[in-house]
Amino acid sequence: MLRLILSLGALMWATTAAGGAWLREEGTAFVATSILQGLDGHSDAALYAEYGLRPKLTLGVKADASMIAGQVSGGSGFAFVRLPVNTGDRPYKLAYEIGVGATLGAETDPLLRTGLSYGRGIKWREKYGWFAMDFAVEWSFGEVPHTVKLDTTLGMGLTDTTKLMMQVFVSSAGDDTSLTLAPSLIWQPRPQKPSYQIGLEAEQGDISLRLGLWQEF
């Protein structure tokens, strides 16, 4: 019974977030957009969208773009498919992704993305949340190096309308490795309405503010 409660709690909270091991319910969609503004003046824009085509097949697109003076200076974009890995009655979920895309900016290089995601529900006192790890490799077929990424998320529902997320992003490309800490608060004022995200990101001493909008359909 506890396993069922944790699974339902994680499904309620985690499927309102972007992807991971939980597939989108058939016939439903999720769209998230956000802007990241650094104190040093740089800015990034992000788009994530997914659609449950079948119970065991989710389609999606994602794009992250670095901006300088209103112009795209870097980033990447992908279209992907996500499928589940059979875990039986275990208390966690696994899914894998395959995507194709390209770098953004002055030059465009083709990319292949492969990923594996793990997720499970958690309970702390009377509150429910989720824990997720998303591992991905973006294989380059051009001049840019391959990129290895590991994103870790711990989320917890605070009230019926708010939840707190703590994320850690690790990325390695060539000889460069970065680690980003990203706490954020998600507020959904009413059911079936958009959710609003406000958070901070800290990378190598640089602090940025993230503002986002999430919507389910």
Image (cartoon, rainbow, N blue to C red):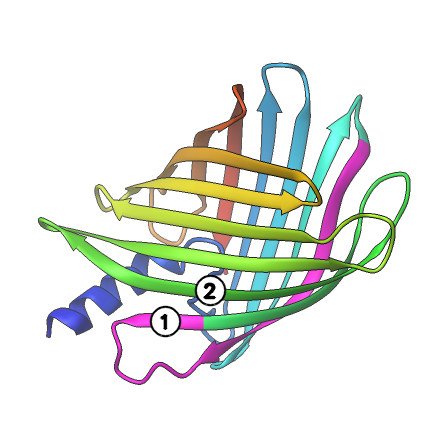
The overriding secondary structure of the stretch rendered in magenta is: strand
**Vertical side of 71 occupied by 142: above or below:** below
- Range shown magenta: 72-94
Q: Is residue 85 magenta?
A: yes
Q: Which residue is mark 2?
A: 117
Name the kind of residue labelled 2 in the image: Ser
How many residues crowd mark 1 within 10 Å: few (<14), some (14–19), many (20+)?
Answer: many
Query: Answer yes or no: do the residues labelled 1 and 2 have beta carbons within 8 Å?
Result: yes
Q: Nearer the viewer, residue 12 or 38?
A: 38
Name the kind of residue labelled 1 in the image: Lys
Tell me if 81 is positioned left or right of 92 in this view.
right
Tell me if 6 is positioned left or right of 28 in this view.
left
Q: Assign a secondary structure to mark 2.
A: strand
How many residues crowd mark 2 within 10 Å: few (<14), some (14–19), many (20+)?
Answer: many
Q: Quadrant of the N terminus?
A: bottom left
Measured as percent of width and height from the top left, residue 5 is found at: 17, 68
Q: In percent of the image, x 44 and y 31: which residue is there?
A: 198
Quarter of the figure with residue 130: bottom left
Q: Is residue 101 magenta?
A: no
Q: In percent of the image, x 58 and y 59: which residue is there?
A: 136
Q: Which residue is mark 1?
A: 93
The mark nearer the N terminus, 1 or 2, is: 1
Q: In percent of the image, x 32 and y 47: which residue is there?
A: 155
**Vertical side of 16 occupied by 60: above or below:** below
